[in-house]
Amino acid sequence: MSQVYIYEQSHNNFGSPLSVVHMESGEFQNFIYCNWHREIELVYVAKGRLHLVVDDRKLTLSQGDVGIVNMDEVHYGDPDSTGGECEVYIFLLGIEPLIPSAELNLKKYLVSLSKGEVRLVPALTPAMPNYNEVVSCLIRMNNVLEKKRPAFELYTAALMYELLYHFFAEPELLVAGSGRGETQSREKIERLNEVIRYIEQNYTRKIYIAELAEQLYMGVDNFYKFFVSVTGISPASYINSYRMKQAANLLVTTGMPVTDICYKVGFNNVSYFIKMFQKFYGYTPKKYRSLSQEKGKIRVE
């Protein structure tokens, strides 16, 4: 798998509990970054094939399939290199923002998802029940958020409830959960967070694997296996990915010289930094900075 950047964040925007991200494999080297969040994520494959890893499950999604990531599940994905170009639409549903204002008869469904008492199936394919209804909802969601007509928030909420209805109305599309805080995903996230915070606080200097292992009171070998099992990449790859992310932000948001950025994010060799940056983003730092001023040319997170 290509290098990835791990992050935990809310994807909601403009105050809506729903957001949509459109991605094509030709736009940038890294596709779906290794991440986790409190939204339910539906990944609709519009073209090609996608390898999606969710916790310990590995799925290969073909055109028309919908991959589903429940709350707090660690996941990442890459296009199938043999399947040509890959295009996906990622729908992020914020269930918890709906709970406070939901009527009692609706709240029980939302709470069951929030607590992890019930989960959606890992994937939805054309042969499964309510497939057409779910995809129809996704298409309308995308259209609503693209146009953003007056009062679009009302229609957005209605579509979210309609989508959930199509899952809850069909028992085959639900999976019993063990409850929030007891899942393997949650335990992994809590442990991984300690390491991530340490890296974020110390990435400007050389970090040794033994340091990271100490944060979890683990031996180096066991820590390495744990980190790779959760993220799909090595600790060193993650550290470099995080440094690249910081460098990209500095290139876009400041006029700082490339040499200064190199040292600021923890590299001590400018030539190596430029080589790594180009490998990660597909552009030299200078080119990346110039393209960042052209809307839609690159992804700036």
Image: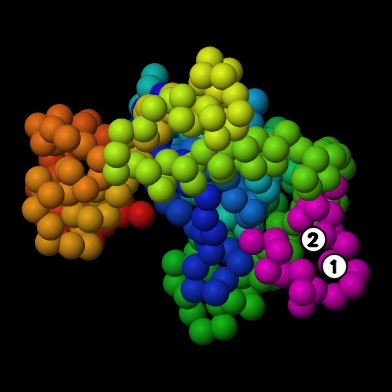
Q: Is residue 31 visible?
A: no
Q: Quadrant of residue 138?
A: bottom right
> Pointer 1: what residue?
106
Q: Which residues are magenta?
A: 94-118
Residue receiving disc 2: 110
- The residue that appears at 17% across and 43% down in the rendered structure is 262
Mark 2 belongs to which amino acid? Answer: Leu
**Residue 173 circle label:** none
Task: Assign a secondary structure to mark 1.
Answer: helix
Image vertical order of residue 123 relative to residue 14, above or below: above
In screen coordinates, is 134 left or right of 281?
Answer: right
Residue at the bottom extreme of this rendering: 150
Regarding mark 2 in the picture, which secondary structure is present there? helix
Q: Position of residue 265 (x, y in %)?
A: 25, 45
Q: Position of residue 131 (x, y in %)?
A: 69, 44
Check if mark 2's residue and mark 1's residue have beta carbons within 8 Å: yes
Mark 1: few/some/many CA within 10 Å (<14, 14-19, 20+): few
Q: Is residue 179 left or right of residue 63?
A: right
> What's the distance in space between the residues labelled 2 and 1, CA to CA?
7 Å
Q: Residue furthest right?
A: 105
Query: Residue at image x 72%, y 69%?
Result: 98
In the image, 36 versus 167, the foreground residue is 36
| 17 or 267: nearer the viewer | 267
Verify whether residue 235 appears in magenta: no
Q: Residue at x 12, y 57 (%)?
A: 256
Amino acid carrying mark 1 in the image: Leu
